[in-house]
Amino acid sequence: MKQKQLDDTHNRNINYLRVSITDRCNLKCIYCTPDGDIPKLDHGDILRYEEIHRIIRIAAELGVSKIRVTGGEPLVRKGVIGFIHSIKTLSKIKEVSLTTNGIFLSEHLESLQDASVRRLNISLDSLKPDRFRKITGFDGFDRVWSAIEQALALHFSPIKINVVALRGINDDELADFARLTLEYPFHIRFIEHMPIGNSSLIWNHPMLTPEIKDRIASTGNLVPIPTSPLDGPAQRFRIEGAPGEIGFISPLSNHFCNTCNRLRLTASGSLKPCLLSNFSEDLKTPLRSGGTDEALAEIILRAVAGKPSGHSLSRGGGAPMNMQMSSIGG
Ligand code: SAM
C-alpha cells in the first residue's frame, strides 16, 4: 500500500487511534451510563480481534503510531492481552496504552507487563469507598486502589488517574486527588464533564478547569510543565517539588481541537474523527464484505478528511450525541 500521511485539511497530523474493543462495562458510572439497562451490541456486531488488528495495521501504514485500548471496559473482553501482544508486533506502532476502570487490573498487570504495556490510565472519581460505590454502582474502591499500588510497584509509568470533576459529587475531593501527587508519581488528570449520550447524571453547570484549579489552589503552587508535540491534550503542571503531575483536560473551557491528533474506532466498527461530533465512517461493512486494504485505507483517509476543525459545544449547552461514551471509549 502506498504510504500516505494522515494529515487533515487543518494541518493536523493524525497519528493516534483509540480503539474501543467492547461496549460492555462492569461499572455503571452515573455520568457515563443511563438509569436502567443500556442496549448492548450483539456479539456478532462487535468487531473481532482479527478485524481490529487489520484496521490498526492499515492505519499504521498510513501513519498511526499510537494506540489506546479502551471500552466499555477493555479488561472484561476475553483475549485482550493476546490482542495487545498482536498489536505490539506491528513495527509502525510505537506505543500501546490502556484505559481501564481498574476493577480487573490486578490480575492482568503481569501479563500487561509481558506485553510491554507501560502506560496506564485508570479512572477513579473518588477516594472514598462509599462514594465510589455511589458513582459506579459497585463496591470496588479497594480493588482499584490496590491495583494502582501494584502497578506502581511494577514500575508502570506513567500511571494516569482520570478524575471527572462532578459538581456536588466529588468536588470536595479534588484537592485530595491533587495532594496524591505530592506522595506518588501519579499523573492526576482532571477532566471536564462532557455532555455525551444519555446518563443518569444531568449535565448542568459543569465544573470547568478554572474552577477546578481554584479548588486545588490550597495544595501548592502549580508550575507549568513544558509540553511536547507528542503530549496529549492535558495542560500539565506540577506542584513545586512533587514527584507526580497534575493535568487538566478542558474540552469545554479550552478546547484543544487545533492540536487534536486522534481517531476513534468504536466496538462496532465506526471510525469517529471527533469525539464530540456524530460524524463517523463505517468500516465494519467493507471489512465483512471483502473490502481490500486499499478500500479500507480510503475510508480511513475519508474520515480524516472529514475531521471537523473544532467541536460546537459551548458552555451553555451541548450538541446531543447519538452514541454513549461507553461505546466510544472516552
Ligand atoms: N472503562 C474504562 C474506564 O473506565 O476508564 C474505559 C472507558 S471510559 C468511557 C473512558 C474515560 O471516559 C473514563 O476516564 C471516564 O471517566 C471518561 N468519561 C466517561 N463519560 C464521560 C463524560 N461524560 N465526560 C467526561 N469524561 C467521561
Image (tube, grey):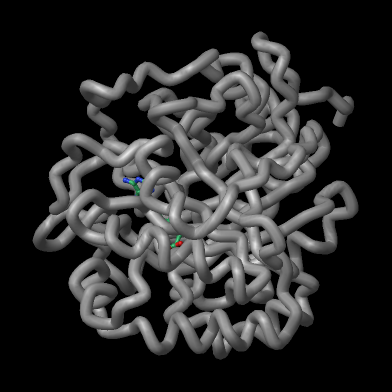
Judged left or right of residue 137, residue 330 is right
In percent of the image, x 41 and y 28: which residue is there? Answer: 253
Q: Residue 106 occupies which quadrant of the picture?
A: bottom right
Quadrant including the N terminus: top right
In percent of the image, x 52 and y 53: which residue is there? Answer: 189
Position of 266 relative to 30 (above/below): above
Residue 147 lies, in percent from the top left, at: 53, 84
In percent of the image, x 58 and y 85: which residue is there? Answer: 149
Residue 45 seen from this side:
no
Q: Residue 235 occupies which quadrant of the picture?
A: top right
Judged left or right of residue 244, residue 172 is left
Q: Residue 244 occupies which quadrant of the picture?
A: bottom right
Question: Quadrant holding ligand 1?
Answer: bottom left
Name the residue nearer the viewer: 147 or 116.
Answer: 147
Name the residue nearer the viewer: 147 or 50.
Answer: 147
Residue 204 lies, in percent from the top left, at: 17, 37
Judged left or right of residue 67, residue 103 is left
Residue 93 lies, in percent from the top left, at: 81, 51
Name the residue nearer the viewer: 290 or 67.
Answer: 67
Residue 211 lies, in percent from the top left, at: 35, 39
In percent of the image, x 66 and y 9: which residue is there? Answer: 9
Residue 19 seen from this side:
yes
Position of 244 relative to 12 (above/below): below
Q: How many marks are shown on the rendered structure?
A: 0
